[in-house]
Image: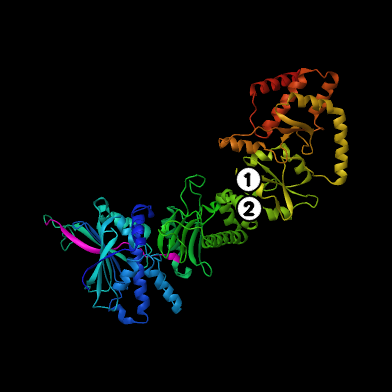
């Protein structure tokens, strides 16, 4: 056949323009696509040779060869795969409606072939990425088993192409890119190496390139020969590692290999805390090699942070920014997911919103959470080490991942009024050791255990022997908004709303006592409320206090002091809110103020004492007082008076 000039289909013309100008966000992708196509071609040759060994033509040394030529300004990608006939060239390159790989996959499915190879390029458009960097592309190919007929195809990407018969000694395909002047960097060794390392490092066939090195001749003793000048030495090097350890059975991977690969994907100098290697089959097929780090990364809580999971499709790197693979509360997980059927858009750079992606995420999350649950049950000390590093992040899942709420709440650990330093309690353990009289799970939020232990809000709970959980992570304020109950026991904040700790008899006795106190000190409470009207919502007698004089509590759905501190630290506007000042009716200061009021309701000292009570309540909850000078002055005056 003589050379013929033909027009691309209208759709192909449109695709070429789209590819060149907007389809791919990164021009480096063109080499990934061509290497992937070459890998597919070798897969096809190996598969067809199972039933027709003559297709090997005496050569089963599979290889993808890259040949940069700076003098000619060309980059050649050569493979010894299945090759194409002229009809296949026209069908697969001149027609966008067809895809060689996709058609091959369908043919294998129809034939129910065993041990089918996994093929990468199922869209038939990756080839067109060549025109992003080349102003002319020449393709020479010969199908395996057809030594008499090769095909030469050429186009400058203007909407037409030429095609003709040619001779080609070896089976396979050779693509020559005539690079545009501004893209000659793709002929540099470092550039080619970096692209192959990033995108095609785990392709199962060697990606090779001839490397030229300048050397000084050496004598028999191994020393350089002085004055001998230099010689150029050319050696073929394999650019990719081909070590996709996630594709191997776990029994064949050593611990050292796992550690080495973790450091490769995470850029972490430490060994991983836990390795999770598994394969999923059925409706969603993929392989995953996940790692739990030993230490939290420095950017764990930064808005702009590195993502943890690298996405591959058939060993070809797609992206490291795949937010859809894991929920944000598992952002510390590192590793690789390699899917064999993940749906991608035409450029392979963007995941489509598809049920398959959700299935993969569900499987990954289930595996990670079940691994943690198993670790907690069988190696608690190890789990505790993990929790101290990543517990605050894992807690976020209770707020955002409702589907896994029950699994997550079993992983939660807390310090409490009954745990020693460094010890923790789970919700299950808490409920198991609740006294029979205790109705709810009690907690208090704050900055750290040592300061919370001193809170007057705990007095009545300690007296009753009711354990109180210490929630000291900032995220806890949001967690408890979602974790309303556990095993039908409601969670109750000790610093919000009213509390009910007493039996019916105790409640009646306490109500009677408070009624008597209200009669005796009701007018005093009104005075205190009037004095502090701009600062508090209400003054009332407390069920919480046994020793301290006073405390501040929020309404059931109000903002407590800890939440205010967190919002201010985040530079967020804090809505105006007033809390309730609770007084201990049995405290001597209440009785002293009551006597002062009876003697002289106009006594100015009552107003000073009211201010002192409020400031005292602020200090015990960890909130700075607005006028420390006045506070210290009043305290000093009281000390002087007491000493007289």
Q: Which residues are magenta?
A: 228-246
- Is residue 526 left or right of 349 when viewed as pictured? right
Q: Residues within 10 Å of mark 2 (few under 14, many from 20)?
A: some
Residue 259: mark: none
Q: How is the image coloured?
A: rainbow
Q: In terms of secondary structure, where does tag 1 sit? A: helix
Q: Nearer the viewer, mark 1 or mark 2?
A: 1
Rendered image quadrant of residue 121? bottom left
As drawn, 529 above or below 306: above
x and y percent of residue 410 in the render?
65, 56
Q: Residues within 10 Å of mark 1 (few under 14, many from 20)?
A: some
Q: Is residue 253 visible?
A: no
x and y percent of residue 598 in the render?
85, 21
Whole-number angstrom distance, CA of label 1 to CA of label 2:
14 Å
Q: Residue at x 74, y 54 (%)?
A: 488
Q: In terms of secondary structure, where does tag 2 sit? A: loop
x and y percent of residue 256 in the render?
43, 62
Question: Mark 1 touching mark 2, by CB under 8 A?
Answer: no
Rendered image quadrant of residue 138? bottom left
Q: Quarter of the image for the N terminus: give it.
A: bottom left
Q: Residue at x 15, y 57 (%)?
A: 230
Residue sitting nearer the eye, 433 or 411: 411
Question: Magenta stretch: residue 242 in it?
Answer: yes
Residue sitting nearer the eye, 118 or 236: 118
As drawn, 8 above or below 474: below
- Is residue 424 left or right of 9 when viewed as pictured? right
Identify the residue position indicated by label 1 in the image.
Answer: 478
As drawn, 410 above or below 607: below
């Amino acid at each position: 056949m003589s050379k013929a000039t033909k027009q691309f289909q209208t759709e192909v013309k449109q695709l070429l323009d789209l590819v060149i100008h907007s389809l791919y966000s990164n021009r480096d992708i063109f080499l990934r696509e061509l290497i992937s196509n070459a890998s597919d071609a070798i897969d096809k040759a190996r598969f067809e040779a199972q039933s027709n060994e003559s297709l090997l033509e005496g050569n089963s040394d599979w290889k993808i060869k890259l040949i940069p030529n700076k003098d000619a300004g060309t980059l050649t990608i050569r493979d010894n795969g299945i090759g194409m006939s002229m009809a296949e060239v026209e069908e697969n390159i001149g027609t966008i409606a067809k895809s060689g790989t996709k058609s091959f996959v369908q043919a294998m499915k129809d034939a129910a072939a065993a041990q089918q190879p996994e093929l990468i390029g199922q869209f038939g458009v990756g080839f067109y990425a060549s025109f992003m960097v080349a102003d002319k592309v020449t393709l020479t190919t010969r199908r395996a088993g057809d030594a008499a007929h090769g095909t030469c195809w050429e186009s400058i990407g203007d909407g037409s192409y030429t095609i003709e018969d040619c001779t080609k000694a070896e089976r396979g395909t050779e693509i020559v890119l005539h690079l545009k002047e501004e893209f000659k960097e793709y002929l540099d060794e470092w550039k080619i190496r970096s692209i192959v390392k990033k995108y095609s490092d785990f392709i199962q066939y060697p990606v090779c390139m001839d490397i030229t090195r300048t050397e000084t001749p050496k004598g028999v003793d191994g020393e350089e020969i002085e004055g001998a000048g230099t010689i150029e030495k050319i050696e073929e090097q394999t650019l990719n590692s081909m070590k996709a350890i996630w594709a191997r059975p776990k029994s064949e991977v050593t611990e050292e290999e796992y550690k080495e690969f973790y450091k490769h994907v995470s850029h972490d100098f430490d060994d991983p805390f836990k390795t999770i290697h598994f394969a999923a089959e059925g409706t969603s097929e993929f392989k995953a090699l996940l790692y739990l780090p030993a230490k939290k990364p420095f950017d764990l809580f930064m808005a702009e942070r590195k993502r943890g999971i690298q996405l591959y499709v058939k060993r070809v790197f797609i992206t490291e920014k795949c937010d859809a693979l894991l929920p944000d509360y598992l952002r510390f997980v590192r590793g690789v997911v390699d899917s064999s059927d993940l749906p991608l858009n035409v450029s392979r750079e963007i995941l489509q919103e598809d049920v398959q992606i959700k299935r993969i995420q569900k499987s990954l999350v289930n595996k990670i959470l079940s691994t943690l649950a198993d670790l907690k049950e069988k190696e608690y000390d190890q789990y505790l080490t993990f929790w101290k590093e990543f517990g605050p992040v894992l807690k976020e899942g209770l707020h955002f991942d409702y589907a896994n709420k029950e699994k997550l709440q079993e992983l939660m650990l807390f310090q409490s009024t009954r745990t020693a330093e460094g010890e923790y309690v789970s919700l299950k353990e808490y409920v198991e050791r609740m006294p029979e009289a205790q109705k709810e799970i009690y907690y208090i939020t704050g900055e750290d255990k040592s300061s919370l232990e001193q809170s007057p809000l705990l007095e009545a709970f300690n007296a009753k022997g009711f354990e109180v959980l210490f929630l000291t992570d900032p995220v806890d304020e949001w967690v408890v908004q979602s974790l309303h109950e556990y095993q039908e026991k409601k969670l109750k904040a000790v610093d919000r709303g009213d509390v009910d700790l007493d039996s019916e008899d105790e409640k009646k006795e306490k109500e009677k006592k408070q009624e008597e106190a209200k009669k005796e000190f009701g007018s005093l409470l009104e005075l205190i409320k009037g004095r502090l009207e701009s600062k508090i919502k209400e003054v009332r007698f407390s069920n919480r206090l046994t020793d301290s004089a006073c405390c501040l509590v929020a309404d059931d759905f109000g903002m407590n002091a800890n939440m205010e501190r967190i919002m201010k630290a985040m530079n967020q506007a804090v809505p105006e809110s007033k809390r309730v000042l609770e007084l201990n009716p049995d405290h001597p200061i209440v009785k002293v103020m009551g006597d002062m009021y009876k003697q002289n309701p106009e006594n100015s000292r009552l107003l000073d004492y009211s201010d002192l009570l409020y400031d005292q309540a602020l200090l015990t909850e960890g909130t700075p007082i607005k006028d420390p000078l006045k506070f210290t002055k009043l305290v000093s005056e009281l000390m002087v008076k007491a000493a007289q």
